[in-house]
Image (cartoon, grey):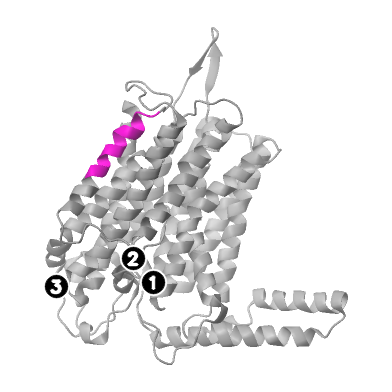
Amino acid sequence: METQEGAPRDRWHFVGIIFFILGLGTLLPWNFFMTASLYFNNRLNTSEWSNGTMTSTKEYYFNNWMTLLSQLPLLLFTLLNSILYPRISEKIRIAGSQVFILIIFILTAILVKVPMVQDRFFSITMATIWFINSFGAVLQGSLFGLVGLLPQKYSTFFMSGQGLAGAFAALAILMAIASDTNAETAALGYFITPCVGTLVTLISYLLLPKLYSAVKFLPTATVSMLCVCVCVYSLLVNKTDAKSLINPFCILYTRVVQEFARFYLNKSKGQSYEVDASRELLPKGIQENGEPNSQATDSVPNGSPCSPESDVARQAFVSIDAEHDKQVKSSVLEVLKKIWVMAFCITFVVMVTLSVFPAVTVDVKTVYEGKWENYFIPVCCFLLFNVMDWIGRSITSHVRWPSKESRLFPVLVVSRVLFIPLLMFCNVQERHFMPVLFGNDWSFAIIMVFFSVSSGYCVCLSMSYAPQLVAPQDGETTGALMMFFLALGLSLGAALSFLLRLIV
């Protein structure tokens, strides 16, 4: 959706900042549990000394199960969208999901202080991961539909926030490690961080006026509390007139956020905007002429943004023009025949990525002893991957090679399979069958750089090329199909990680 004539300006980017925060909040569950794998593995450590040697009595394969149970909800709720969304209002889906995510994060923080046998702790943690990522999948799909009502640049704000979620989690674990507290207190502080982040996300959503009820969202408790704080501060500290400070704030909020929301969201009153994937994936679900189109988009575990100028945002986040609604849509099979190469590419890219990250990469050990041991995985695995993946996606705003018609692109995608043995030949411990060929830290870091940059680059190209291969009226079906294959690739990669970790 281009910025329409007569549209109000988003002064000081208030709306953009809100969607940036919302984007960051959608991937906090995945990233904070993934980055905390060292904490969970330490609590599940059942190693004991026997005859002067350390033996392990049970292997939980936490990283593999964590990855699988994090990605299966995305695949499941992609298929259940048409059943879930019409029956539950947007406000309940978004705010309710955030509330449950906040509750689960609080319970996870409490469990840090609760002693528990390993089997019970593992079962509770796996159930926690499943439910928190299920709510995250509902939240993500609902917000993708909401951001689709706004101009294209707000999808960039949203996905930029998703892109920083992984780096945010990595920085949080680094700060916890760097603190001079014991491991238990550091873990508690680490899990309190996403509680605060989720609460800020919830408040940001409540501050965003939506649809026809924009006016009702203005006098929210959050805004009222802010006004009270300004009033108290001005009276007790500055001895000034509180009204003189509150009035400009209210006027600013009303004119910028409320006026902006009225223009874009009121026009879509009654319009269906959620990502309705299963309706699009079934032949019976093809819409009749004149029915409003939904939006769909891509998302990966780290959620970095594609290029702001790319056509994927126009197809994935933008309502198709009314003249296109009057045209006859192609069947799902006809669309699939046109985009099957890109569907294969997106599936293969994320499958390769999730097959070794983080299940294999998190077990790589540094050759240096000392404090660096504690920082090695957070820096060289999690922080490096998230930053480089974001850079890979950003490159597509300047370079798009190979072209969508080129046969070289799927070859490039398939060639990424070479990263699997390369990472398995790094200093992964414990190992059983494969030798260590890249034992030093620099080798692992260099491989991770190319691995993550190529992942972000290929994912972004796949998702941006697919809508260009079909007619405009088939953009909705294309988006739903690509989102399904994205979720399928993530689940396949998570399942494959079990086998790859066993044969290292």
The answer for how far apart the CA atoms under marks 3 and 2 are is: 20 Å
Mark 2 highlights which residue? 297
Q: Disc 2 or disc 1, which is closer to the eye?
A: 2
Secondary structure of the residue carrying numbered label 1: helix
Residue 248 visible in this rendered orientation of the protein: yes
Residue 494 visible in this rendered orientation of the protein: no
**Residue farthest to the bottom, as pictured:** 6
Q: Earlier in the sequence, mark 2 or mark 1?
A: 1
Specify whether 311 is left or right of 25.
left
Q: Which residues are drawn in magenta?
A: 415-426
Mark 1 highlights which residue? 145
Specify whether 106 is left or right of 91.
right
**Residue farthest to the top, as pictured:** 51
Q: Earlier in the sequence, mark 1 or mark 3?
A: 1
Percent position of residue 350, x then y: 31, 49
Q: Say above or below: 10 vs 382.
A: below
Please tell me in which quadrant of the rendered image residue 285 appears.
Answer: bottom left
Percent position of residue 453, x then y: 37, 49
Secondary structure of the residue carrying numbered label 3: loop
The answer for how far apart the CA atoms under marks 1 and 3 are is: 22 Å
Mark 3 highlights which residue? 330
Q: Is residue 420 magenta?
A: yes
Q: Earlier in the sequence, mark 3 or mark 2?
A: 2
Percent position of residue 206, x then y: 56, 73
Q: Say above or below: 433 vs 486.
A: above
Q: Observer-nearest residue: 349 or 500?
A: 349
